[in-house]
Amino acid sequence: IQSGSGGTEAQDWAEMIMRMYMRWADSHGFKVTVDDVSDGDVAGIKGCTLKIEGEYAYGWLRTETGIHRLVRKSPFDSNSKRHTSFASAFVSPEIDDDIDIDINPADLRVDTYRASGAGGQHVNKTDSAVRITHVPTNIVVQSQSDRSQHKNRDAAMKQLKSKLYELELQKRNAEKNALENTKSDIGWGSQIRSYVLDQSRIKDLR
């Protein structure tokens, strides 16, 4: 959560948003941790990072990303004039860095063939070389370095795991980059909700 421009009024609004999410999470049985908070100059906060844990927490909160607009008579204005303030919220899932590659045998096509040496000569008379195709990704690996088909299969499986790990790593990096791009797209034009306090009215602008 980040306060917009507008000094104390905007910083007070950012703290109100923070309390709103903390109370919502608490009432829904989610665990809330304040990972980071930057206090405002007079009141409120300049920004904070909340960690909300629980089943489907991200699914519930992901649509909260955007600009939240507050209209109220400011308690910080001696003339009690109406002020408009902004705060932004950005929701992202916690990415699990532990990558566990689980290969389903049903996804594999295993072919055996005779290993070839220099000049195309067959190294031995048995089909000891192994080629494995991972059908969902179309990744193909092969090994023919050993006379044992069993050892060649093990070597090919290690190659496959390594390639699938790299693929998953690329996918996760792409997801992280997409989230960061979403964050940079939050401009004042992307208001999602307007809160008008003196009319007790909240309007979703999407």
Image (cartoon, grey):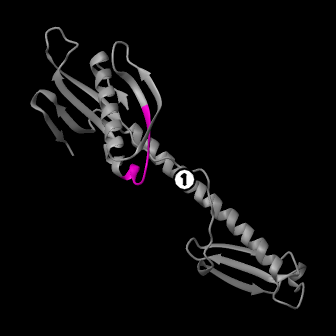
Is residue 50 located in the magenta-colored stretch of the structure? yes
Is residue 129 located in the magenta-colored stretch of the structure? no
41 or 166, which lies in front? 41
The quarter of the displayed image where residue 102 is located:
bottom right
Q: Is residue 45 left or right of residue 125?
A: left
User: Taking 72 as reference, is 100 above or below it?
Assistant: below
Residue located at (83% from left, 77% from top): 151
Q: Which residue is denoted by mark 1 in the rendering? A: 172
Residue 78: x and y, percent? 17, 8
User: Taking 18 as reference, is 166 above or below it?
Assistant: below
Q: Is residue 139 left or right of residue 151?
A: left
Q: Secondary structure at mark 1?
A: helix
The magenta span reads: 49-59
Residue 24: x and y, percent? 31, 41
The quarter of the displayed image where residue 124 is located:
bottom right
Residue located at (21% from left, 29% from top): 70
